[in-house]
Image: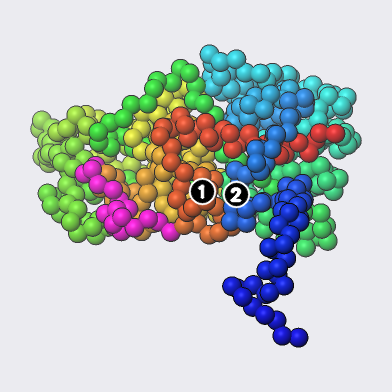
Amino acid sequence: MAMTIRNGLPHHARRFVAARPVRLFIVGLFMVVIVIGLGLPVFPGHNAVQPASGGSGWFGRKKVDVSRLRVAVLEPSMYHAEVVAAVLGVMDDLNTETTLYARQVEVTDALHQIVHGSSPKWITAPWDLAGASIASGDYDVAIITTCDVKFWMGGGGSEEILDDLRFSASTRVVCIPHEIESYGYRMGEDDFGMVGTFGLGQRLDYVTLGAHSARALTHSLRRFARDNDQPFWENTPIESFAPVFEVPATVPKKTHRKQVTKAGIVGRIDLDHRDYSRILQELEQSIMRELNYRLPWVSAHSPVNPQLWGYEVIHHREAGATSSTLRLSKVDDDAFTLHLIGFASDRQPIYPALLLDEDSPVVHIHEGASTAEFYTLVRDLDVLLPAFIDDLYVQARSSASIPTAVIAETPLLANAPLLEAYTYLNPINYILSPLAWSAVASLATLRRGGDPWVEEFGAVPPPAPPPLQPHWWTRRSEQPEHFSTSEEYRRALRSVNAEVWRRILAKALP
């Protein structure tokens, strides 16, 4: 039968719309109720995979109250106090009843410095009492903040505590792994076996410290499920959060200089994961160049010379010596300095003698700083260099230096892969640099008051991340959300973190 089309609608459809508007309204309202009830997004254009969604729900649905949950935080090692602090901060924001069991005194000492002057809600208890408390059913959720077997057993974590968790069937377990690149596949270490009982019982959640770590862990879980005929691993939930907290109250306020004067690198001072050798070599070469000498890794219109860094090179001859040595002399009160903040290893870089000049040192090494001193040093920097030597920290493992910069309000020198990995970063706390530029090239441009990205590409914005890897701060457009201050940005981060953890903890509610 022929169908009459008028104004874009079949004739009988126009009659239905015109004659039964009330019926159409009722049907539409019914469908919206079903969609909301199922927790589906009402607006198809909204990014349904946005990490910041959930928790409060659509149309401002009331948030789930998790404050009555009892939470145990278990930390056997001495290496991840900053992650413990971030987790405890979120638990306080959610008003849970939280107890920390830390085996190493270094962790509790660091936490006491972080919370100095505040009144945290969480309490501490002796490590030796953790197993008995778990076995007695004292906790609804146990968060293992260092969940790699390597750190658990190496730090003194006992098999007895794990057994108590295995037999406490009502306790959900949250596992935070760190060395994602080898998790589950390190020779002689059974990471999956450590938490397999919880996964099989559907009471296990993984939490990573970056979106890239979550993606890498997903691949490992799928591979393990396939290779070992254990399908439950493929469906084990994985979340990520930003491990940030408020800087210790004893740390001075951030000061902003007119020129980039202090740059820094934080973490272990070794050659395995950070490109110290290249940075030190290029910095020495840049300072040594004659006036207006153009380096190949800087734009043709960017002269680099000693005066750019605030120094001049002089020939120094000791009394009675037959030859002279090159020395540096400051010609500017804002002379550039590079600060290495961490602890040295057996594989330290070779430091150019010129950069360690006893009268005008360019490089300053800070070892053994307390937690408060560490954040004081980082906050005093004008820019923090990730300085990664390879892709490890943007493809699998999460670096502590990234949240450290956020906590200390110090801008990161970032590139596109870094932003795609640490999706919680926002333009308020990074300086974007082309991937092909070295750190020294970007620093030279910043010293002149330029912008590395703009100098190379003009005002063209960086490409948006892939659709399945959204930035936390992207809502209905591809542009990041704007924050007026670092404090506003960190408050927003804490809010997103709270919703991530609320989703996890809510699974333990009856």
Q: Is residue 75 left or right of residue 476?
A: right
Distance between mark 2 and mark 1 Cα atoms: 8 Å
The answer to whether residue 166 is above or below residue 229 is: above
Please say whether residue 460 is one of the residues in the magenta stretch.
yes
Q: Which residue is the site of mark 1?
A: 474
Q: Which mark is residue 355?
A: none
Q: Is residue 261 left or right of residue 275?
A: left
Q: Position of residue 493 (x, y in %)?
A: 54, 36
Q: Tell me how many marks there are.
A: 2
Q: Position of residue 237 (x, y in %)?
A: 73, 48
Q: Is residue 478 left or right of residue 9?
A: left
Q: Which residue is the site of mark 2?
A: 50
Element class at badge 2: loop
Given residues 399 and 312, the one toward you in this image is 399
Q: Are marks 2 and 1 in contact (CB under 8 Å)?
A: yes
- Residue 140 makes an appearance in the image: yes
